[in-house]
Amino acid sequence: MTSDANVTRGWDKLSSTLTRLGRPEAQPEGTPVNMALTRGSTVLFPTLNDMRHQGQKRFDHAYIYGAMGTPVQHELEKAIAVIEGGSDCQVVSSGLAACTTPLLAFLNAGDHCLLPDSVYSPTRRFAENVLKRFGVETTYYPPCASAETLTGLMQPNTRVLFSESPGSHTFEVQDVPMLARVAHAHGARLMMDNTWGFGIFAPFTHGVDVSIQALTKYPSGHSDVIAGAVTVAKAEDWHLLRDTAIQLGQLAGPDDCWLTLRGLHTMGVRLSHQARSAMQVAHWLKDRPEVARILHPAFPECPGHEIWKRDFTGAGSLFGFVLKDTFSQSAMEAMIDSLKLFGIGASWGGYESLVLPTSKGITRNFPADEAEGPSMRLQIGLESPDDLIADLEQGLSVLKAHA
Ligand SMILES: *Cc1c(COP(=O)(O)O)cnc(C)c1O
């Protein structure tokens, strides 16, 4: 059994750093704790020469024009780069834009890209529509594919191997160091959607070239911001990414960046608490006769559990579970409708608990072999885990009544 320390270690280690990041430099006359919020499109310069000079610094977090980011966006970018352990970061308008912007930056017409079958479905839709229209071909691979299988799927024009670990809805943990070896042996970049592992998975020490974050989730943490971030391992990739983001008009508003910076300061304690509560709820569910399987990387039955133990320093607030196949989809939906403390809605990573069904409407090219019961996904918030368990207990009685 995984102890609480294994799911909270990384959060506890990060907490002191999180309280220091993105704060103003100390001034002799006194310094506010938090950064000022600067809103602005136009920036005025004393002379044309000053304006031209500042314009050359678009790769250095300079304040040139609002569309190239404001000071608070640039502080957020520096903070994310520190947490991810990368060279440079570009903040964009959403987590989805954080997936699409680097794909547009690092792929050209005629290129090939590999996506895990467990990828976040809007990323899949982008590949099927926009990338396809612009002449990029995509192949899907099983998220737990071996190095041999992946090597067999690489083509001479494969330029991006994409990873998402754990996978959306199905939670497969991927062997990222192996993916990096395969990608790099074929001259491709490894791009990873690291939203679940933010702060507890160090993408760049495991060989990732481009790490993607939905800041909407843990960093902002209060379900009131949509924003994303793209961080690169190496300065060589920074100019192309930054130039592409500027050409696409990608940025996040100063208010959203400020709220995200504020959320970052408390992320360690929020997520440490939420990761522990999620474990308590998951352990309770595992012992219930109605439940077939827990989809949480810290549980041995989750595909890739051993890799999670090797590569992650903690766990997050989001996991799934599968009901026994004697229960119908409609019985599960009645259970979901009966829950009082779990909101029904998209997204996760906020302070409040959420539930969504996951057994219908997800696209997979390689569906699981065995027939399984209906499944759902839980986001565990800051409520008392005992109250959440009591809510699930009454929900399971509704499930059984519909069986
Ligand atoms: C939510 C999510 C996104 C998209 O984030 P938005 O800010 O909602 O666009 C991307 N990837 C993963 C894994 C997510 O969970």
Image (tube, helix red, strand yellow):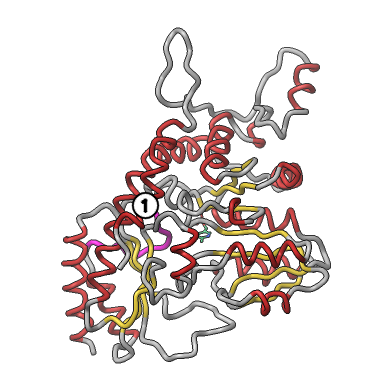
Label 1 CA crowd tier, 10 Å (few <14, some 14–19, many 20+): many
- Range of the magenta residues? 341-349
Residue 359 appears left or right of 252? left
Q: Position of residue 401 (x, y in %)?
A: 18, 86
Q: Residue at x 26, y 69 (%)?
A: 283
Q: Does residue 331 appear to the left or right of 111 in the view shown?
A: left
Query: Residue 244: image x %, image y %?
Result: 73, 47
| Residue displayed at 67% across by 28% down | 62
Q: Position of residue 9 (x, y in %)?
A: 37, 50
- Residue pictured at 75% horizontal, 42% vertical: 239
Residue 226 is covered by the magenta coloring: no
Where, quadrant-wise, is the C terminus in this rendering? bottom left
Q: Residue at x 53, y 26 (%)?
A: 38
- Residue to which mark 1 is pinned: 350
Residue 298: which quarter of the image? bottom left
- Foreground pick, 55 / 276: 276
The quadrant the N terminus occupies is bottom left
The response on whether ligand 1 sits within 8 Å of label 1 is no
Amino acid carrying label 1: it is Gly
Residue 386 lies, with reference to residue 171, above or below; the image says above
Q: Say if the magenta span includes residue 342.
A: yes
Whether residue 111 sits left or right of residue 160 in the image: it is right
Q: Position of residue 50 (x, y in %)?
A: 76, 17
Judged by its main secondary structure, the magenta piece is loop
Specify whether 269 is left or right of 341: right
Q: Is residue 257 above or below residue 149?
A: above
Nearer-the-camera pick, 72 or 239: 239
**Residue farthest top in this picture:** 29
Describe the element under mark 1 as helix, strand or loop: loop
- Compare residues 291 and 403 and report the one nearer the observer: 291
